Amino acid sequence: MKIKENISLLPYNTFRMDVCAKVYAEYESVDELRRLLAQYRGERILCIGQGSNLLFTGDFDGVVLRSQMVRARALGENGDEVYIEADGGLVLDELIDQVTDMGMSGLENLSYIPGTVGASAVQNVGAYGVEAKDVIVSVKAVSIATGEERIFTNEECRFGYRDSIFKNELQGQYVIVAVTYRLYKHGALCLEYKGLEGARTAAEVRERVIAIRRTKLPEVSELGSAGSFFKNPVIPVEQYQCLAARYPDMPHYEVANGVKVPAAWLIEQTGWKGKTLGGAAVYDKQPLVLVNATGHAQPDDIIRLAQAICDAVQAQFAISISPEVNYIA
Ligand SMILES: Cc1cc2nc3c(=O)[nH]c(=O)nc-3n(C[C@H](O)[C@H](O)[C@H](O)COP(=O)(O)OP(=O)(O)OC[C@H]3O[C@@H](n4cnc5c(N)ncnc54)[C@H](O)[C@@H]3O)c2cc1C
């Protein structure tokens, strides 16, 4: 167990916000986690993984908890299926590297997404036609209030687009300590995205996904960001039809509750792509990504830029876009 007081969170968030936490603690077992929860009962608790989907808006007056539990184990097999349980603190991409190396499929499209196994369930991470919910069987979590363990089935996690019960009703109430995934020895690959056609193995899909992502997204080691800053909005069919008359080339996807429009396209139309505001900027290769352009951007720079973009999209399209990134006040 490691506990530090009044430390900068700069190394612990990929936006590289230099804010301070009252307490920062790491745990290596569920017992240590329970001891920390008991020690700091009554304090504000924030669990973080790699801090790759967070925007600290200022100093954090509470306890930041980070898992150092990083193992994965096979729980069993059922025909073609293999059940793998991974600790919440394991880096998701390290897990994917291991399982694809062993020939298992299911997670490969999520390759190279920054972050941990625990957060993959909170966020229901997704890329290239696959979401974490497609392969998550259950989530093991510890109650922050009582220290008791609870298993959530996939259904109980109420997964949605970059969403789960852990971001809604149960926000801030549980620490995810492990996730069980259902993978496949000879499962079908998801190759519907451009660039993945014809891949024959999970390892090949992984290689291609990594190559594509490297061309499109900033490396967080070089340029601070939290990935896609906004979610893609879903608008009513009637609104889409009105807009399509004005913007015939507007990309769109029909979904159950309306029409999904890529936020990146909307932002590009407003002219914000590549623009800067204070130390923050809209990434020039992908307008959905806001970056810490100078390396010294303040939380307020990012907040003001995000708000300016929302306002511009609202003014031009009457569409409200909302952040995917978690603001931590
Ligand atoms: C360059 C870049 C590219 C990205 N690309 C994608 C992408 O393609 N698809 C995608 O879906 N996301 C993407 N992301 C976003 C990010 O990688 C994911 O949201 C990821 O799941 C965050 O993991 P993390 O460990 O860094 O979580 P953090 O950012 O530390 O935390 C995210 C949320 O999860 C909570 N949390 C974290 N760990 C736990 C835990 N153990 N128990 C309970 N709550 C917890 C936090 O409190 C917070 O609410 C990208 C980010 C970057 C920087």
Image (spheres, rainbow, N blue to C red):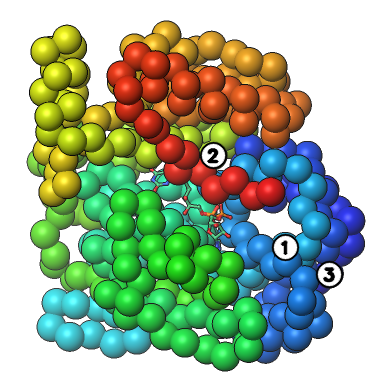
Write down the residue under mark 2. 226
Q: Residue at x 43, y 47 (%)?
A: 113
The answer as to whether callout 2 falls within 8 Å of ligand 1 is yes
Q: Find the distance from the CA under tag 2 to the CA under tag 1.
A: 18 Å
Write down the residue under mark 1. 64
Helix, strand or loop status at disc 1: strand
Q: Residue at x 16, y 40 (%)?
A: 258
The answer as to whether callout 3 falls within 8 Å of ligand 1 is no
Quarter of image, res 210? top left
Q: Is residue 301 left or right of residue 77?
A: right
User: Residue 233 location in percent, x, y?
Assistant: 30, 36
Above-or-below relation of 32 to 108: below
Q: Earlier along the polypeptide chain: callout 2 or callout 1? A: 1
The answer as to whether callout 1 falls within 8 Å of ligand 1 is no
Q: Earlier along the polypeptide chain: callout 2 or callout 3? A: 3
> Hey, what amino acid is under mark 3?
Ile
Q: Residue at x 44, y 17 (%)?
A: 312
User: Residue 159 location in percent, x, y?
Assistant: 32, 63
Quick one: quadrant of the N terminus?
Answer: bottom right
Helix, strand or loop status at disc 2: strand
Q: Find the distance from the CA under tag 2 to the CA under tag 3.
A: 26 Å
Write down the residue under mark 3. 3
> Hey, what amino acid is under mark 1?
Val
